[in-house]
Amino acid sequence: MFKTKAAVLYEAKKPLQIETLNQEEPRHGEVRVRTSVAGICASDHHYMIGDNKMPMPVVLGHEGSGYVDSVGPGVQNFKPRDRVITAFISGCANCSYCLSGFVNLCTTSTALNTKQYDGTLRLKKNGNSIHQMQKLGLFSEYLICPQQSLYLLPDEVPMDVAALIGCCVTTGVGAVLNQQASKPGIDIVVFGLGGVGLSAIMGAKILNCNNIIAVDIKDHKLEFAMKFGATHTINSSKSDPIKEIMSITGNGVDMAFDTFGRGSVTNQAIEATKRKGTTVIVGLAPIGDTVNADMIGLCRDQKTLIGSFYGSISPHESFKQIIKHYLKGEIDIRALVERTYKLDQINEAFNDLENGLDGRGIIIYPN
Ligand SMILES: [Zn+2]
Ligand SMILES: [Zn+2]
């Protein structure tokens, strides 16, 4: 049986365990990928601390890049040694969302969750099945995924940059670029400066926004955001962000993005927008969290509140768009990478995320 070393989550609030797992061969339409780089994302962390639920035991990791190792029957578009980005929503090609181009909203993918499209799992330990987050599970040296999860990577894009395009860059840049209200010259505010928030700022730079205001509770994160195109920063633990935003813009921003994902932050984002302004929820809130918005304000000021998931459109379209901007030198995705780890250091990597260090941490595999 094929073996792979992986970090396994058995229970929330317990450390990940590094173990050797058995991996079945790729079935029809599936590909075995040798992982090259995996990003450390807050969405993985939500499951680790019990803020969100996932079948367990599970190999987490949904942001990454790698090399095609082998392909199952019926795979025509990929061959061994191809360089790929993994998309954490792959698309079934049959549901109404996939058929209308919104692969990011595929209902079959959501229903099957950690299982492959034939409804089964590929990893085992002592005869027990182990789940793969989003049909991926990049905290493993090798993974098996549907071929439609993969995006063929141009040679000029390095593996670390490619990995981040797999989740945070697409989520943040896409949330800004792919809305009806998005146009050059608007004022925007981004709440939360993790990988997604910094990527939203990159998106605002691509869009050529006027004021790009970054809000966080840590000064070092605010300073870091200036590298990516923020024109103003506000520490919301030291001053009232709404007052500050009004003094910068006069009457509020055109668009506000909550990349942190908390009802209280979304509420501030709504307050920060001007009449006809749009607030976009980009970060995943803990289960059960709600927005307590001023309804008269929403109505009289004709404000819009929307959600954006995984860049708002098909991930493959987002990847193509972002790679184009990256290759033109318009965005510095690599500047997001602040820390690198080996797979054995994964618990340390998540401690650093929890402690709010700048930028993104990544796991680099020895290949
Ligand atoms: Zn993520
Ligand atoms: Zn679908």
Image (cartoon, helix red, strand yellow):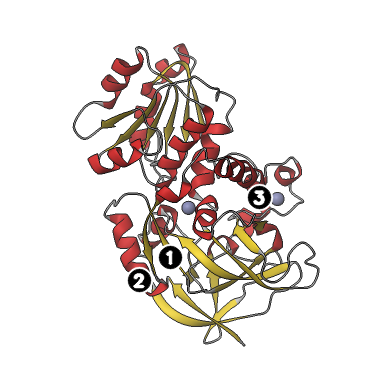
- Amino acid marked by disc 1: Ile
Reading the chain from its start, which is encountered first: label 2 or label 3? 3
Instruction: Report if the beta carbon of the residue with label 3 is closer than 8 angstroms to ligand 2.
Output: yes
| Tag 3 secondary structure | helix
Q: Are marks 1 and 2 in contact (CB under 8 Å)?
A: yes
Q: Position of residue 340 (x, y in %)?
A: 38, 63
> Pointer 3: what residue?
107
Residue 345 - label: 2
Q: Reply above or below: 79 against 240.
A: below
What is the C-alpha distance between the residues marked 2 and 3?
35 Å
Instruction: Tell me which amino acid carries mark 3.
Output: Thr
Q: Are marks 1 and 3 in contact (CB under 8 Å)?
A: no
Q: Residue at x 28, y 26 (%)?
A: 241
Residue 260's x, y, as percent?
Answer: 38, 42
Front residue of 93/196: it is 196
Quarter of the figure with residue 217: top left
Element carrying mark 2: helix
Q: Is residue 57 above or below residue 327?
A: below
Q: Which residue is mark 1?
A: 363
Amino acid at dot 2: Gln
Q: Is disc 2's CB within 8 Å of ligand 1?
A: no
Query: CA gap, disc 1 to disc 2?
Result: 8 Å
Residue 364 in picture, x, y percent from top left: 45, 67
Instruction: Please give the name of the residue rendered at 56% of the width and 80% of the height, measured from the top-left corner.
Output: 124
Q: Look at the image and tell me whether residue 13 can be seen.
A: no
User: Where's the N terminus, which quadrant?
Assistant: bottom right
Q: Is 345 placed above or below 329 here?
A: below
